[in-house]
Image (cartoon, rainbow, N blue to C red):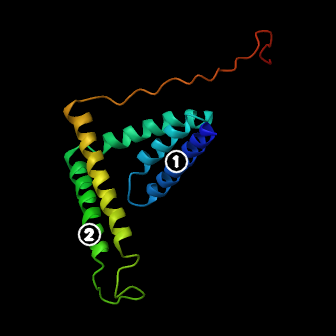
Amino acid sequence: MRRKVRTLGRTVLGWALVAAGLVALVLPGPGLLLLLSGLIVLSRQYEWARRSLEPVRSKAFQVAQASVDNWWQMVLSLLGALCLIVAGMLWWADPDIPQVWKFGPHLPAAGWGTGLGLIVSGLVALGLIAYSFVTFRIRGEELPRPTTSTRPIATPPANIEDPP
């Protein structure tokens, strides 16, 4: 019974992280990190998750390295993260804004939930930028090489001849 509950909890957590990662790919947030985390959790139970892990991991490291490739990208990444934090504070405070078309006198979806989500996303982004900077700029580490597939390659039988 205990093992079933643990398996169910791990499955629910993994799928929740995958779903949050997919949402965060298009909204502000660490989408690839959440997606990778969900696949890591699910890979303990499912072979398809284990196979999907390496391509997502590789892409996450490529994006992390690209964010600190040059100073302009780093500055823009930092400004984006700081803008998320400031926007979160603004949405949390829910100030009165001028009525423009359908928006106003309050910010859409304003409140502590939206504000906190934006602030946490900005802080996670700052942490990931710092990690990428230390890993790829200070230590000078290279991207991990993708592992080779363990899937066997089909070869034609030796007795089949090429058509003329």
Q: Position of residue 158 (x, y in %)?
A: 76, 9
Q: Which mark is residue 38?
A: none
Q: Position of residue 149 (x, y in %)?
A: 56, 24
Three-letter residue code for mark 1: Leu
Q: Which residue is mark 2?
A: 89
Q: Position of residue 35 (x, y in %)?
A: 48, 46
Q: Quadrant of residue 133?
A: top left
State yes or no: discs 1 and 2 in contact (Cβ < 8 Å). Answer: no
Residue at x 44%, y 37% (from the top left corner): 57
Looking at the image, the residue that sits furthest to the front is: 1
Residue at x 27%, y 59% (from the top left corner): 80
Residue at x 51%, y 36% (from the top left corner): 53
Q: Position of residue 122 (x, y in %)?
A: 29, 57
Disc 2, SS: helix
Disc 1, SS: helix
Q: Is residue 159 visible?
A: yes
Q: Which residue is mark 1?
A: 13
Q: Nearer the viewer, residue 87 or 15?
A: 15
Q: Quadrant of residue 33?
A: top left
| Crowd class of label 2 (few under 14; some 14 to 19; many from 20; radius 10 Å) | some
| The C terminus, quarter of image | top right
Q: Is residue 69 visible?
A: no
Three-letter residue code for mark 2: Met
| The N terminus, quarter of image | top right
Q: Quadrant of residue 81?
A: bottom left
Q: Earlier in the sequence, mark 1 or mark 2?
A: 1
From the viewer's perspective, is residue 105 above or below residue 109?
Answer: below
